Image (spheres, helix red, strand yellow):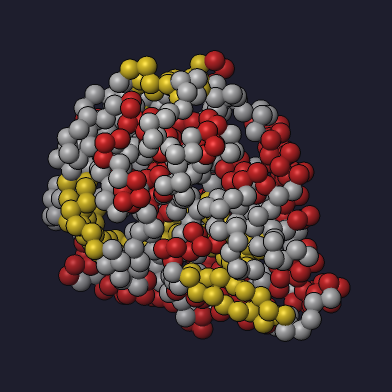
Amino acid sequence: MKPIRTRTVRAIAVALVAGSLTLTACSSDSGSSNKGKDDSKSQKDAAKQQDPVAYGDAAASNGPAAEVAGAKSGGFINVYMQSDLTHLDPGQIYVSDAGQFSNLIHRGLTNFQEDKDGNLTVVGDIATDSGKSSDDGKTWTFELKDGIKDEDGKAITSADVRHTIERLYSKVIFDGPTFVQSWLSGNDYRKALPDGPYKGKHLPDSVLETPDDKTVVFHFDQPRPDLPQALAMAGYSIVPEKADTKEKYDKAPKSLGPYKIAEHKPGKSMKLVKNDQWDAKTDAVRHQYVDGYNFSSTVGQPSQTKRLVADQGEAKNAIQFTDSVDPAQMTTVIGDADAKKRTIQGYQPYVWQLTFNLDRIKDKKVRDAITYAIPNQSMVQADGGRYGGEVAGGLLAPTLPNYDPTYDPFGKLKKPNGDPEKAKALLKEAGVKEGTKLSYAYSNTPRGQAQMVIIKDALAKIGFDVQAKEIDRASFYEQIGKLKNPFDLYMTGWGQDWSSPSTVITPVYDGELVADGASNYSHIDDKQVNDLIKKALTQEPEEAAKTWEQAHHRIVEEINPAAPVYYSKQIQLYGSNIGGARYSNESSYIDINDLYLKKP
């Protein structure tokens, strides 16, 4: 692709982290005091998130980060979460909660700098700039800044960057993004370095080169204009070579960012304190206003919402991290002027979809029947109504360029609560017997539980006996990511890694990426789709857009590996003593980089 500077959203495969739902309490989603005014985010807001991104030079990459107006130093911010983070090892991070956390303790070669209007620039993080390309975009060179150290005071060199990339080839890493590895070594990249760097072997200099302590050079077989955006993902943050403890690193990573882990009680709490080895002069993105963060990972979403609406005691200094306002309390929040002014809202890049295991549900008529039966609007209502999402027609979000709002092959805009009669007719054609069992895996979060109730009821109405299987949230994507998983159906959410359909269609629907731990959860392997992906990846952006659209239509209409359910929105609460709160287009949550306490 031509190096067009498309805006990126670094949000990844979304974790099942949103909230507690009482279905009967969600029929109304706006307070009476609102008088019907709809100030929720729309697809027009989503379109604004497609604005071009700049690739920053050395000047843009220099620290310190621009001061936040009125910011003060001191105090601890309380962070409410309903369960623990999925991973702490950056190489394993590919879900949104850990991605949000990563910016507090990890640093990569590049990062996203976001201005007050939500415009994004890729800047050098530990690199001096966003990278220099040569050889028609096939070669990228990064120089490292002076003064970058880990929390123990050890200087970061090019050897640490090489180690960071090479360890992703080993079996130690089973989650996380695979873009850079596959670009360097192909889809079977693990074969190029099966043990990673742990037995003394390395990628050849013709692939990854470190000519001196300050220089890192990536060599690709075709132009990779999106490399600076890929390297800004949390999954490519630096792991110092001498600090790497392999599997154990996921429990106690070394910090390069403004904060470090002082105490961690898995499943309960975590305390972050200032990292005194972090130098603000080297960082153009982050601040170190507060003394630290106190994470509580046992606060359910209803409790988070109640505490923050009441705004008493410790809640004044608290934020929701990646959870949203409890849908059952949405009326209260929207109708309470004080609470509502302490919310941030935005259109997220995620599409919720009911994914079919194609190894088990092989008949497309059955998949189509289930798709028609899904009550999409009920799913939206259960996740906050118009403040939580909008009915989806396809698998590409409104935050992507060239999004088509009229695309709706299953007629969900006309029949948002499904077409059970059409579903029954398709099942009759397919010869499916009444009472046929289906295994549905769901996350043990309130959102996952609410989705399960709706799906189970809708499929029961068309004759299925749904066997619901609960999975712990922390291991949900790991479990459904196994090729031999025993489930027929599972609800997944996916968001673009940057503003290109390539970051949705390739990782989720490319048949060459069917593997344990991969993101192709449906196991779709269609030659036509695979060929279209290959074609689009070599085309100029304008041509590629048409090819991606063709692939999307083929996937949704002719194969249907995942039923589109809804496009996701975000609304979060924070306490009255929190300063600098705003929605981040980059993370799709509260901007973690600019927060401070008004009264420390």
490 relative position to 272: left or right? right
Tell me what residue is drawn at x 72 percent, y 80 percent: 436
Q: Position of residue 472 (x, y in %)?
A: 44, 69
Q: Nearer the viewer, residue 283 or 214?
A: 214
10 relative position to 459: left or right? left
Q: Could you say which quadrant of the image residue 87 lies in?
A: bottom left
From where the camera sits, is residue 232 visible?
no
Tell me what residue is drawn at x 72 percent, y 84 percent: 435
Q: Position of residue 206 (x, y in %)?
A: 50, 20
**Location of the N terminus (image quadrant):** top right
Extreme-front residue of the structure:
199
From where the camera sits, is residue 370 visible?
yes
**Location of the C terminus (image quadrant):** bottom left
385 relative position to 314: left or right? right
Q: Could you say which quadrant of the image residue 533 lies in?
A: top right
Q: Could you say which quadrant of the image residue 452 lies in?
A: bottom right
